[in-house]
Image (cartoon, rainbow, N blue to C red):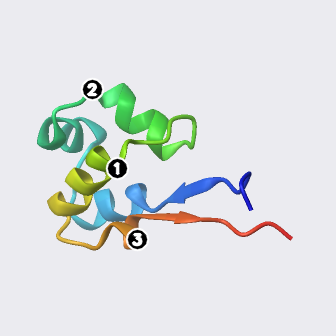
Amino acid sequence: MGKEPLKNNLKVYRAKFNFTQEDLAKEVSVTRKTINTIENGVYIPSTYLALKIAKVFNEPVENLFYIEELE
């Protein structure tokens, strides 16, 4: 444990809610680039930001972010 990449379902939830990256960014007070880098796994959001994103979609945070198990 330790090096497993954090994955996310942000693109899926954005599509479900018909949100652009810009729409989601405005909802959680960050830039569109921040949302883009989170979606692409370049940036791991803080716990606070992850919880804010989950609240926008009214989902538990673990439905949006998860650790991919490596073999």
Task: Give the secondary structure at mark 2.
Answer: loop
Q: CA distance from mark 3 to mark 2?
A: 23 Å
- In the image, which is nearer the foreground, mark 1 or mark 2? 1
The image position of residue 24, as x and y in percent, is 22, 44
Q: CA distance from mark 1 to mark 3?
A: 11 Å
- The part of the image, by quadrant, that contains residue 21 is top left
Q: Amino acid at mark 1?
A: Thr
Q: Amino acid at mark 3?
A: Glu
Q: Are marks 3 and 2 in contact (CB under 8 Å)?
A: no
Task: Give the secondary structure at mark 1.
Answer: helix
Few, some or many residues within 10 Å of mark 3 (<14, 14–19, 20+) = few
Viewport quadrant of the C terminus: bottom right
Give the mark, 1 or 3, whose residue is nearer the N terminus. Answer: 1
Q: Nearer the viewer, residue 64 or 23?
A: 64
In-image side of 25 versus 43 (left or right): left
Residue extending farthest right: 71
Q: Nearer the viewer, residue 44 or 34?
A: 44
Give the mark, 3 or 2, whose residue is nearer the N terminus. Answer: 2
Q: Amino acid at mark 2?
A: Thr
14 in relation to 62, above or below: above
Q: CA distance from mark 1 to mark 2?
A: 17 Å
Few, some or many residues within 10 Å of mark 1 (<14, 14–19, 20+) = few
37 in relation to 61, above or below: above
The image position of residue 40, as x and y in percent, is 54, 42
Q: Which residue is mark 2?
A: 31
- The part of the image, by quadrant, that contains residue 46 is top left
Residue appearing at x 25%, y 53% in the figure = 53
Q: Which mark is residue 62?
A: 3
Q: Which mark is residue 47?
A: 1
The image position of residue 14, as x and y in percent, is 30, 57
Give the mark, 1 or 2, whose residue is nearer the N terminus. Answer: 2
- In the image, which is nearer the foreground, mark 1 or mark 3? 1
